[in-house]
Image (tube, rainbow, N blue to C red):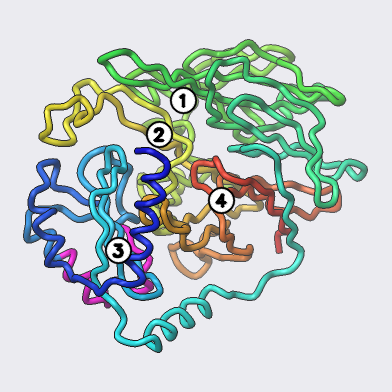
Amino acid sequence: MALSKWWALVASLAFAWEGAAAAGLESVWPKLEAWDGVRAVTLSTNLENPYAEEMYRQFVNGMTERGFSVVPLSDAQKQNEGLVAELLETKTGIVLAISKASDHTLLLVESVSSYRTEGDSAQRQTARASANNAPTKPNTRTIKLAGHPQQIAALPVTADTGLNLALLYDDRLEWVAVEGDKALTRAQFPSGIKASRSLYVGSGELDGDPGHEIAVVWGQDRDIVGKGTYTRLFAQMVETRERELQSESPLMDNVYIRVVNDRVLAQKSQQNEAFSGPVLSMTTDVDRFDLNGVEPGWEGYWLYEITPMTDGSVAAWSQPGELSLFSPGETAGPSIGELGSVMHPAVAVRLSERRMVSADPAPASSVNETFEPLPRRVIVRQSELYTIERGRKSRLAGLLEPSGQDRIVRMRRSAASEGIVKEEPFVAQDQYILDFTIESHPNGEASVVMLTNKKSDGSGPASLVVQEIP
């Protein structure tokens, strides 16, 4: 679509939402009944209490009556088939937008419910603003970043250097020192891979020499004509030396690596499997990193799915967005519940058979690959767990500003019950938290450092948000 036509469409939609009378769902049903693809819909909404909204109930019931399976966004995995529906509250009423899950093509936008009076709208907006305006906690600072870093890891803090961080970009690794409100680049290490994507960075003191080791994983999406796309992996160990970043291993092909408790673990990948085979330990002698034997305790899990704790228990992503805690010998444990869906970074995996997403025989109506999101980071500190809670969501296929907030949450076992206690001691962010790390200071204190971005895929303006751990 030409740029001028696109902006004309956006302008006409905005005018329709503000000025047109609500048409209800009667005009929507014939268009949905004509859909010839997979009858599944992922439903997203910004309504404060959707089950109490008559329009929400009418839409869900109407879709199920017409043979659609409806899954709330919080319970859905990323899919390439069916439809995505967004039921959104605006200043004048509720708007319904429906798009294809396969390519996000917008199929319809309808104003389905309008507020009867300006007072009704103002009352709802005031209530929402009051709920979102929690008091700001002290000891927080924000540092703007250049470019689009995707992942972050902590490097040692000294009294004379302050915060030191490893930032992973799609095409490079940067060693950054934070001084006041500025992030100063101390050294860079290029990926050396054409069209690479950043997937993971971790750090630790691994081999006893003066430098600090950094584990990085980049991916390169490769398209096999007629057979789909897969992500080829490139892993490498890098070391800080004075004011330089130097390679400490050759590029390792089709393998993930991860730093866990000052050790390096690895797992292989194949074109049709995001993670393949067992999790392996690695030899980490000086300037030598070799795959070793099978790592016990990781059977049945992906490399990034579980995080060992100091007492022998394990924090595990039992399903997307749900974190559970297992004691030694257990196969199940208490869950913290839903922490939202994080879809980036992800790796492309070839499908064994082409999957149809529509009855249309055109090639665009089927896919040869799927994208597997990598589990988000979990950090253990003093027997407590830290991770990202994704509360921020896109609206109307990106045409409206996202709503909701991301935050770092802290979790621990309850002393009074068998459950998990979740705490929210950190400032919620009106941006997406892509990744985070914890910096330990020489005085024994520590800070959470959040890597935030205005876009969920990290392509927007980026910042660091630093807050002391209370």
> Residue 426 lies in what quarter of the image?
bottom right
Provide residue 68's location: percent of width, then percent of height: 12, 53
Amino acid under disc 1: Val
Amino acid under disc 2: Tyr
Q: Earlier in the sequence, mark 3 or mark 4?
A: 3
Q: In this view of the protein, can residue 318 be seen by the observer?
A: no
**What residue is disc 3 on?**
87
Q: Judging from the image, what secondary structure is the residue with disc 2 in?
A: loop
Instruction: State how far apart marks 4 and 2 are (Cα).
Output: 32 Å
Q: Residue at x 87, y 25 (%)?
A: 242
Marks 3 & 4, CB-CB < 8 Å contact: no
Q: Is residue 59 magenta?
A: yes
Q: Residue at x 46, y 44 (%)?
A: 328
Q: Residue at x 55, y 16 (%)?
A: 194
Q: Nearer the viewer, residue 89 or 299?
A: 89
Provide residue 403's location: percent of width, then percent of height: 46, 62
**What residue is disc 4 on?**
454
Instruction: State how far apart marks 2 and 3 are (Cα).
Output: 36 Å
Q: Viewer-nearest of labels 2 and 3?
A: 3
